[in-house]
Image (cartoon, grey):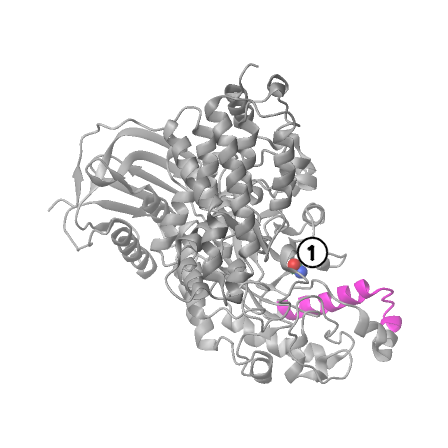
Amino acid sequence: MRRFALICACFATASAAQLPLMPAPSKVTRYEGALRIDSGFRVVLTAYSDSRLMGASDRFAAHVAAQTGIPVTAGKALTLQVDCKERGSELPTLGDDESYQLDTTSREISLKSRTVTGALRGFATLEQLIEPGPDGFQVPAVRIQDGPRFPWRGLMLDAARHWMPVAVVKRNLDAMEAVKLNVFHWHLSDDQGFRVESRRFPRLAQLGSDGNFYTQVEIRQVVSYAQERGIRVIPEFDVPGHTTSWLVGYPEFASLPGPYAIARKWGVFQPTLDPSRETTYAFLDAFIGEMAALFPDSYFHIGGDEVDETQWKRSGSIQAFAREHQLATSHDLQAYFNQRLQKLLKKHGKAMVGWDEVLSPGLAPETIIQSWRGQASLAQAAIEGHGGLLSFGYYLDHLWPAGQHYGVDPLDGAAGNLTAEQTKHILGGEACMWSEYVSAETVDSRIWPRAAAIAERLWSPRETRDTDAMYARLANVSRMLEWRGVRHRSALEPMLSRLAGGPVPQPLWTLAGASEALGIEGRRNLRENASLEPLNRFADAVRPESDEVQALEVMVKRMASEPAAITELRANLTQWSLNEIRLQPLARNNSLLSEVLPLAANLSRCGKIGLRALELIEAGHSAPAGWVQEQNRELDRLEEPVAQVRLAAVRVVRALLAAVPSPAAASVTPQTLGNASVRWGNERLRNSAATVPNWIFEMARSMIAPN
Ligand code: ACM
């Protein structure tokens, strides 16, 4: 039985850029033809083989079955030949060879790699190539030669502020594998929770976690699950600050006497380990020894960020210690602490990773600096001979649009001036998912699909920078991740249904699709500011970036050439215009819905402005003098956040207003179009005319009547 059937090469060859691959490979050659995926297929491991590769090939088959709905049965026909030369390092290791070559023709598929990890990366690409075609599912004929730009491509997950059960971690590891991220940085302790069982120091988790912590058995399972997927696991135990939860069970290691209680608010807190006492180092020695055995990677993250010096200043014994050791400032005291810690890590076979606050003279050269406060520290780390990771610009909790993260490159800014030798120290970066306003239920939608844009920035050649093309591919990845069990899209329906107390009514869907959740900056100091506050509101349900609005923005681009786009836009604007009146009866006696009624009112107003703009565009009539400006001012008002949500629909209407014929048409400039916001976010666009994409000018010019 033939597993992949040959089909005729009767469809047009698309350009490589259109292949729905993310991260985009370094080199793609497209050929005529495609291989049809028939019922079942077989993966043949023609060279090196081991349990990890066999496991990966089984997972690949399962993913293909899920994606296509075609049951995969073991068959004899030769289908996918995997020619892997050797195992590679026993455990995923920094600098592993992850390159591969994939050849698909209308007859067969071949995947070549030097290492098992390279083969895994090839499987991930192949899955993304599967598409519906004229005769069913198919794989287009291509040659792909690919390898990563940076060796360290991470996702940090904060399991301390909100608890993230093992199932959440595992499905996010699956998603990481799909987009070729290779480091899972697990933030395991903070003021609000200590999340790992320690047998040496049981009160850490017993008293510091509200009962939510990973057992050692679970940690081993996750580490092994990640290893199978070519992902390293780096634990972070943040010291000496951010340690309130440690001190609940062990106040004797604090800089001032306790008692201590788990922090319930967000922010930077005073409880800090005592750097002046030998007992602190004896404790850390034993603790790190225990954790070093659980986490096999040779790197270990010690945090080191945001140390509040209050306790150190108030402690007479710490001040005496500082004087005795000539440690003039709290930064010097922290540097002393870090150096002591570094010796302990070395004793247990680990190199240190720390946030950029740890950068100071005297650090061992193998220390890696993770820059979160700016790009300058990344360059400084490289100049001083340390490895550097960029996370500034990759903070997912800010809920930036994917395109904004995508625009940040580890070699931008000060790192752009490094010598070739210094540049080698820039190892990559990490997307960071801090969890102040993120729960196990919402975390997937706060990570995905936006983290895929960062994954591409870190894997693909630097020249891969076209944001529109990225968005087109991101939509495909987002859909694919659903098949891997990630709940970034599917969690929306039950969360909205919970708000409605029944099936999700259409106006609520409409409002959710027109809205985007605000990130941490927009939620600070608002009603909920505590870890026990539920994250069950409309702002928690809606996504950071609206696919619906994005699709409508594309329609605005196309409306000059596609009459159907106008029809579609009108239908949506009409729905928007009716939102308030339709939602009102549903919100009666429902506080969770009532809080979004002002948002619904804004959406209705927005829809009405859009409908009027569309009328003028269709009729080719110019707007009355000052009308467009007046409407844009109104949109400024409608864009003000309500219930921690931003009305994304405003962007569509702004783009329509920019296309309304006006007497000033002939003098369209980036400045006049500065408000025609697209997906990059309003401030960026207003502040920088250079970021207004060409299509806006072209569309506006083409649509503006000559009068
Ligand atoms: C950090 O965001 N404090 C590393």
- Residue 275 in view of the camera: yes
Residue 280 sits in quarter = bottom right
> Does 210 lie within the magenta span?
no
- Which residue is at a point 37% across and 52% down the rendered structure image? 116
Q: Is residue 95 above or below residue 559?
A: below
Q: Is residue 593 above or below residue 551?
A: below
Q: Which residues are magenta?
A: 322-345
Residue 590 screen position, x and y as percent: 50, 66
Q: Amino acid at mark 1?
A: Asp
Q: Could you tell me which quadrant the C terminus lies in?
A: top right
Front in this rendered view, residue 399 or 499: 499
Residue 135 screen position, x and y as percent: 19, 37
> Does 328 lie within the magenta span?
yes
Instruction: Write down the residue under mark 1.
Output: 356
Front in this rendered view, residue 239 or 9: 9
Ligand 1, what quadrant?
Answer: bottom right
**Direction from residue 135 to residue 509 in the image, left or right:** right
- Which residue is at a point 64% across and 25% down the rendered structure image? 625
Q: Main secondary structure of the magenta part?
A: helix
